[in-house]
Image (spheres, coloured by chain):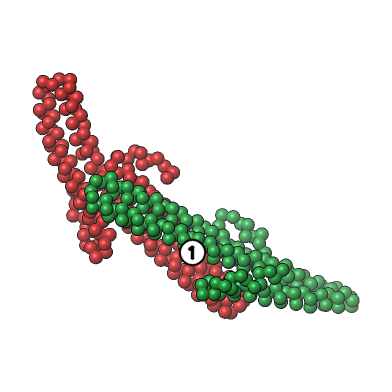
Chain colours: A red, B green
Amino acid sequence: MASLRGIQQPELSKKLFKIIKSENHTIGAYESASRERISIASQLSDWGEATGDDSLSDVSDKLGVLLSELGEQEDVFAQNLEDYRTVLKQIRNTESSVQPSRDHKVKISDEIAKLKYKEPQSTKIVQLEQELVRAEAQNLVAEAQLTNIVRTALTTSNPTNRRRQDFPLDDHR
Amino acid sequence: MASLRGIQQPELSKKLFKIIKSENHTIGAYESASRERISIASQLSDWGEATGDDSLSDVSDKLGVLLSELGEQEDVFAQNLEDYRTVLKQIRNTESSVQPSRDHKVKISDEIAKLKYKEPQSTKIVQLEQELVRAEAQNLVAEAQLTNIVRTALTTSNPTNRRRQDFPLDDHR
């Protein structure tokens, strides 16, 4: 982890933010392995040809074809990882959007507690308590949306359920 | 290919020298993918636990175990690649040791051609021709040893033939 930017992320999405970053490194590693593998494949075939030994040349060429296919599959795998990383990003974005609603709720609760201690008779307490109920309702919906999007994302990782991928909650804001 | 050191290698082992270098990058890529994968596995499990959702926590923990196993297998794969790279190195070393014998043969042939043009009556020509026959014989053996070591190496990539790995020609010098 070379950067500390994760620290600037809302608390709730910090963990996923880091996972998404690590996953990017992993994808890069697979892409690099794929590129090198394909390059080695043709080099090995060339080397076999240069030996001037017919059967060696034949074997090394076949090995080259095999290695080249392996390299291409490695690249397909990296692309699939990229798709899965996109799903993680959707979850992370929802987590980030839920954070302000949590913060809002906590902030009002704190204000009420402070007022009750300093000016227990203040009429503002009632007003804040009403506000808190509204904030709690809003947060309840946000948390439910988050749970839904996460569960939907985990379900769509099952290929037989691909249709659910048009997340029903994606336009929740 | 960040370095041009391959250029200092004997012509014969240049190709393998480059392949061995590329293979080192590939192995590094797999090792890095393995490390990241194992790290992501535990991060994903932590993230699931932090959601406070029991079933999510359960699924993410199981996914974590699976990813962690994947990462470990990736590392085993990298180790096996390292073994195969060692075989390539043995071939490359033999190729390097064959090069001087080839060069020697060519050098004598060149000298004979030069002498025949400049001093066609020189008695040195007969002497050089005898030397050439000896050099050709020595080179013939070296080339045969190279062919043998390459074929043996390709055969030992078949696991049922592992015993042949104690290369019978390894001490050819």
| Residue at 31% across, 53% down | B61
User: Does residue B104 lie above or below A79 as drawn?
Assistant: below
Q: Residue at x 77, y 74 (%)?
A: B135
- According to the image, label 1 marks what residue? A37
At x 23%, y 48%, the residue is B53
On screen, residue B24 above or below B142: above
How many numbered badges does the structure rendering display? 1
- For the C terminus of chain B, the quadrant is bottom right
Residue A28 in view (yes/no)? no
The answer to whether residue B67 of the structure is visible from this angle is: yes
Question: A122 or B39: which is nearer to us?
Answer: B39
User: Which chain letter matches label 1?
Assistant: A
User: What amino acid is labelled 1 in the image?
Assistant: Arg
Relative to residue B72, is residue B12 drawn left or right? right
Q: Quadrant of residue B104?
A: bottom right
In the depicted view, which residue is nearer to us: A22 or B114?
A22
The location of residue A136, given as percent across then percent down, is 15, 38
